[in-house]
Amino acid sequence: MIHKFKTLIDNYTHITVITHINPDPDTIATGLGVYEILKNYGKKVEIVNLSNDIPNNLDFLKNYSKIKNKINYDRSLIISCDCGDYSRLGFEVKEREIINIDHHFSNTNYGVLNILDGDAVSASQVAYQFLKDEFKITTDIAECFYTALVSDTQNFTTNNISKNTFDIASEFISLGINPAKVSQNLNQRVSLASLRLRALALKSLTLHLNATVCSMVVAKEDILVSGAKTTDLNRLSIYTTSLSTVEIGILISEINNLSKVSLRSKSIDVSLIANSFGGGGHKNASGFTLDYRDSQELLDEIIKKIENRG
Ligand SMILES: [Mn+2]
């Protein structure tokens, strides 16, 4: 497969790295690592994200300032990072060849080359394991991949982590990265607006089905009043499974004309529920987005599905 990868990139002078809509640190940091690898290999590379709202606590990563919100190259090879299906790219690139690097079980194989590992804890793990024997992994690249790994495992606390996760982390440390620097940037650069939003979201916390399900709703007004950005919503879902009795957490966010739902679980497969609403994701972390719906009605419908699941 690495040969096909090399043949593909050798066929092009220009490469566009695409990161997913509603970006999280895994997509951005994996994209930046891949960007640097290809630059060092001698390619003309651009890295894009559809939104203008990139988490700014990632600005310590090399080439962060190069991220643009439009594709400038007319003809380029596309490399997508952490995008489970084509719509996650956000750009119209159907006519171009796509290399798809991802770790979602639900990935739809939309690329000409699909580099997938559903057991990997981050897209950066997939990229690193695939590329490390053929390309030089510098400290800057390792820092990107490590940041993505720490973020997608919520600081090594998700239940998909294993010895392999720590082995890879230790390889990144051998490559010269500073774990404390990454932790501080990821966890201790929270904006006041996002703390205010967290308070409002926690205020909405409600328990259902004998306290086995926990929901939180972020209303349009909450985002407005707190001054938070939509990327500040990313971290809120962790609170929905904080309580010991809770098996499934639901976070509903009213963003513009959309209802965005994040589902989290301790062991139950919530991706099936996300699928039934047209979404996808991982067993313990998945979600879906709908045209705006009344949050209480939507919540009732989700809870009914949870109650009636087979
Ligand atoms: Mn990811």
Image (spheres, helix red, strand yellow):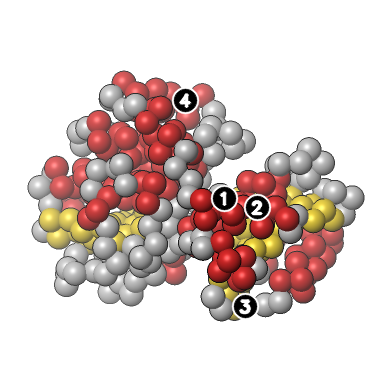
Q: CA distance from mark 4 to mark 1?
A: 30 Å
Q: Residues within 10 Å of mark 1 (few under 14, many from 20)?
A: some
Q: Is residue 261 left or right of residue 206?
A: left
Residue at the disc numbered 2: 199
Q: Residues within 10 Å of mark 4 (few under 14, many from 20)?
A: few
Does residue 194 appear anywhere in the picture? yes
Identity, as a three-letter code, of the amino acid under mark 2: Ala
Asked where in the image residue 291 lies, by quadrant, the reply is bottom right
Residue 129 location (% of width, % of height): 35, 36
The mark closer to the camera, 4 or 1, is: 1
Residue at the disc numbered 3: 292
Residue at the disc numbered 1: 195
Quarter that holds the N terminus = top left
- Which secondary structure, mark 2? helix
Of residues 184 and 29, the one nearer the viewer is: 184
Q: Are marks 1 and 2 in contact (CB under 8 Å)?
A: yes
Q: CA distance from mark 3 to mark 1?
A: 25 Å
